[in-house]
Amino acid sequence: MLPAPASGDDWLGLTEDPLPVGSAADWSVLPRCGAVVLFSGTARDHAPGRSEVELLEYEAYEEHVVPRLALIVDEMRKRWPTLGRIVLLHRVGVVPVGESSVVVVASAPHRPEAFAAARFGIDTLKSSVPIWKRETWSDGESWALEAQHITAAAEAPSSEGSV
Protein backbone atom coordinates (compact mmCIF):
# COMPACT_ATOMS: atom_id res chain seq x y z
CA MET A 1 0.00 0.00 0.00
CA LEU A 2 1.21 3.49 -0.87
CA PRO A 3 1.61 5.34 2.46
CA ALA A 4 0.63 8.96 3.01
CA PRO A 5 3.56 11.35 3.36
CA ALA A 6 4.74 12.09 6.90
CA SER A 7 4.91 15.82 6.13
CA GLY A 8 3.80 18.30 3.49
CA ASP A 9 0.51 18.80 1.72
CA ASP A 10 1.11 16.83 -1.49
CA TRP A 11 0.76 13.05 -1.86
CA LEU A 12 2.03 11.93 -5.25
CA GLY A 13 2.77 8.42 -6.38
CA LEU A 14 2.77 5.51 -8.75
CA THR A 15 2.22 1.98 -7.47
CA GLU A 16 1.31 -1.55 -8.49
CA ASP A 17 -0.72 -1.93 -5.29
CA PRO A 18 -4.42 -1.13 -4.94
CA LEU A 19 -4.87 2.60 -4.41
CA PRO A 20 -5.73 3.85 -0.89
CA VAL A 21 -8.87 5.74 -1.92
CA GLY A 22 -10.35 6.17 1.56
CA SER A 23 -7.00 7.01 3.13
CA ALA A 24 -6.40 9.67 0.45
CA ALA A 25 -9.70 11.36 1.29
CA ASP A 26 -9.08 11.13 5.04
CA TRP A 27 -5.51 12.47 4.72
CA SER A 28 -6.77 15.48 2.74
CA VAL A 29 -8.95 16.84 5.55
CA LEU A 30 -7.51 19.98 7.17
CA PRO A 31 -9.14 22.24 9.78
CA ARG A 32 -9.01 25.23 7.39
CA CYS A 33 -10.55 23.31 4.49
CA GLY A 34 -14.31 22.85 4.38
CA ALA A 35 -14.29 20.99 1.06
CA VAL A 36 -12.62 17.75 -0.01
CA VAL A 37 -13.29 16.57 -3.56
CA LEU A 38 -12.16 13.08 -4.53
CA PHE A 39 -12.10 11.64 -8.03
CA SER A 40 -11.51 7.91 -8.35
CA GLY A 41 -11.18 6.53 -11.87
CA THR A 42 -12.25 2.89 -11.78
CA ALA A 43 -11.79 0.17 -14.37
CA ARG A 44 -15.13 -0.39 -16.07
CA ASP A 45 -16.45 -3.37 -17.99
CA HIS A 46 -16.89 -1.58 -21.33
CA ALA A 47 -15.43 1.08 -23.60
CA PRO A 48 -16.67 2.66 -26.82
CA GLY A 49 -17.12 -0.19 -29.29
CA ARG A 50 -15.85 -2.74 -26.78
CA SER A 51 -18.14 -4.80 -24.64
CA GLU A 52 -17.09 -7.17 -21.93
CA VAL A 53 -13.82 -5.43 -20.96
CA GLU A 54 -12.17 -7.88 -18.60
CA LEU A 55 -9.25 -5.87 -17.28
CA LEU A 56 -7.04 -2.88 -17.76
CA GLU A 57 -3.27 -2.84 -17.59
CA TYR A 58 -1.22 0.32 -17.19
CA GLU A 59 2.42 0.97 -18.04
CA ALA A 60 4.31 4.16 -17.32
CA TYR A 61 7.54 5.91 -18.12
CA GLU A 62 8.11 5.65 -14.38
CA GLU A 63 10.97 8.10 -13.85
CA HIS A 64 8.87 10.86 -15.43
CA VAL A 65 5.59 10.24 -13.61
CA VAL A 66 6.17 11.83 -10.18
CA PRO A 67 8.03 14.86 -11.61
CA ARG A 68 5.09 15.48 -13.97
CA LEU A 69 2.62 15.01 -11.12
CA ALA A 70 4.60 17.64 -9.18
CA LEU A 71 4.27 20.05 -12.12
CA ILE A 72 0.50 19.53 -12.07
CA VAL A 73 0.42 20.28 -8.33
CA ASP A 74 2.49 23.44 -8.91
CA GLU A 75 0.01 24.60 -11.55
CA MET A 76 -2.96 23.75 -9.32
CA ARG A 77 -1.50 25.83 -6.49
CA LYS A 78 -0.88 28.75 -8.88
CA ARG A 79 -4.48 28.66 -10.15
CA TRP A 80 -6.09 28.05 -6.74
CA PRO A 81 -3.72 29.43 -4.06
CA THR A 82 -6.06 28.51 -1.18
CA LEU A 83 -5.81 24.76 -1.81
CA GLY A 84 -4.98 22.65 1.20
CA ARG A 85 -3.90 19.12 0.42
CA ILE A 86 -3.60 17.51 -3.01
CA VAL A 87 -3.40 13.82 -3.88
CA LEU A 88 -2.40 12.49 -7.32
CA LEU A 89 -1.94 8.72 -7.36
CA HIS A 90 -1.91 6.32 -10.29
CA ARG A 91 -1.71 2.57 -10.48
CA VAL A 92 0.37 0.52 -12.90
CA GLY A 93 0.09 -3.14 -13.78
CA VAL A 94 -3.15 -5.05 -13.98
CA VAL A 95 -6.24 -3.27 -12.63
CA PRO A 96 -9.30 -5.54 -12.44
CA VAL A 97 -12.74 -4.20 -13.30
CA GLY A 98 -14.15 -2.23 -10.37
CA GLU A 99 -10.79 -1.21 -8.87
CA SER A 100 -9.33 2.31 -8.96
CA SER A 101 -6.61 3.13 -11.45
CA VAL A 102 -6.26 6.80 -10.52
CA VAL A 103 -7.14 8.97 -7.52
CA VAL A 104 -7.17 12.76 -7.41
CA VAL A 105 -8.11 14.68 -4.27
CA ALA A 106 -8.18 18.41 -3.67
CA SER A 107 -9.06 20.11 -0.40
CA ALA A 108 -9.83 23.80 -0.14
CA PRO A 109 -11.64 26.22 2.15
CA HIS A 110 -14.64 26.22 -0.22
CA ARG A 111 -16.17 23.78 -2.73
CA PRO A 112 -15.79 25.79 -5.99
CA GLU A 113 -11.99 25.76 -5.72
CA ALA A 114 -11.89 22.12 -4.63
CA PHE A 115 -14.11 20.97 -7.51
CA ALA A 116 -12.25 23.04 -10.10
CA ALA A 117 -8.84 21.93 -8.86
CA ALA A 118 -9.79 18.24 -8.77
CA ARG A 119 -11.19 18.47 -12.30
CA PHE A 120 -8.04 20.22 -13.50
CA GLY A 121 -5.92 17.61 -11.71
CA ILE A 122 -7.48 14.59 -13.41
CA ASP A 123 -7.78 16.23 -16.83
CA THR A 124 -4.18 17.41 -16.77
CA LEU A 125 -2.88 14.10 -15.40
CA LYS A 126 -4.59 12.26 -18.27
CA SER A 127 -3.09 14.62 -20.87
CA SER A 128 0.41 15.25 -19.48
CA VAL A 129 1.65 12.17 -17.60
CA PRO A 130 3.24 9.33 -19.62
CA ILE A 131 0.97 6.46 -18.59
CA TRP A 132 -0.55 4.08 -21.13
CA LYS A 133 -3.55 1.79 -20.82
CA ARG A 134 -4.14 -1.61 -22.39
CA GLU A 135 -7.71 -2.87 -22.43
CA THR A 136 -8.50 -6.56 -22.71
CA TRP A 137 -12.04 -7.47 -23.74
CA SER A 138 -13.95 -10.47 -25.04
CA ASP A 139 -12.78 -10.06 -28.66
CA GLY A 140 -9.26 -8.69 -28.26
CA GLU A 141 -6.99 -6.11 -26.69
CA SER A 142 -5.59 -2.67 -27.45
CA TRP A 143 -3.04 -0.29 -25.95
CA ALA A 144 -5.48 2.62 -26.46
CA LEU A 145 -2.99 4.44 -28.65
CA GLU A 146 -5.81 6.72 -29.77
CA ALA A 147 -5.60 8.39 -26.34
CA GLN A 148 -4.69 12.06 -25.85
CA HIS A 149 -1.26 13.39 -26.76
CA ILE A 150 1.05 14.24 -23.87
CA THR A 151 1.16 17.99 -23.14
CA ALA A 152 2.64 20.20 -20.44
CA ALA A 153 0.62 20.94 -17.30
CA ALA A 154 0.67 24.69 -17.94
CA GLU A 155 -0.86 24.09 -21.40
CA ALA A 156 -3.95 22.49 -19.89
CA PRO A 157 -7.17 24.45 -20.14
CA SER A 158 -8.47 26.25 -17.11
CA SER A 159 -11.16 24.42 -15.16
CA GLU A 160 -12.25 27.60 -13.41
CA GLY A 161 -15.98 27.95 -13.50
CA SER A 162 -16.56 24.49 -14.95
CA VAL A 163 -17.28 21.33 -13.05
Image (cartoon, rainbow, N blue to C red):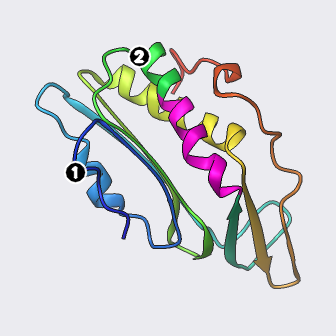
Give x and y (percent) for residue 80: 41, 16
Which residue is farthest bottom?
138
Contact (Cβ within 8 Å) of mark 1 with mark 2: no
**Mark 1 to mark 2: distance in Å?**
21 Å
Tell me: residue 136, above or below residue 40. below
Q: Residue at x 76, y 71 (%)?
A: 135
Q: Residue at x 83, y 39 (%)?
A: 149
Tell me: residue 32, above or below residue 50. above
Q: Which residues are magenta?
A: 61-73
The crowd level at tag 2 (other Cα within 10 Å; few <14, some 14-19, many 20+) is some
Give x and y (percent) for residue 130: 72, 49
Which residue is farthest front?
63
Tell me if 66 is positioned left or right of 24 in this view.
Answer: right
Q: Nearer the viewer, residue 100 or 161?
A: 100
Tell me if 158 is positioned left or right of 105 in this view.
Answer: right
* Residue 26 numbered mark, or none: 1
Quarter of the image with the N terminus is: bottom left
Give x and y (percent) for residue 137: 79, 79
Tag 2 residue: 80
Q: Residue at x 61, y 48 (%)?
A: 65
User: Amino acid under label 2?
Assistant: Trp
The local secondary structure at tag 1 comes to helix
* Residue 99 numbered mark, or none: none
Give x and y (percent) for residue 53: 72, 76
Residue 133 lies in the magenta stretch? no
User: Amino acid under label 1?
Assistant: Asp
Give the prevailing secondary structure in the magenta stretch: helix
The local secondary structure at tag 2 comes to loop
The numbered mark, 1 or 2, whose residue comes first in the sequence reads 1
Residue 122 visible in the current orientation:
no
Q: Residue at x 88, y 56 (%)?
A: 145
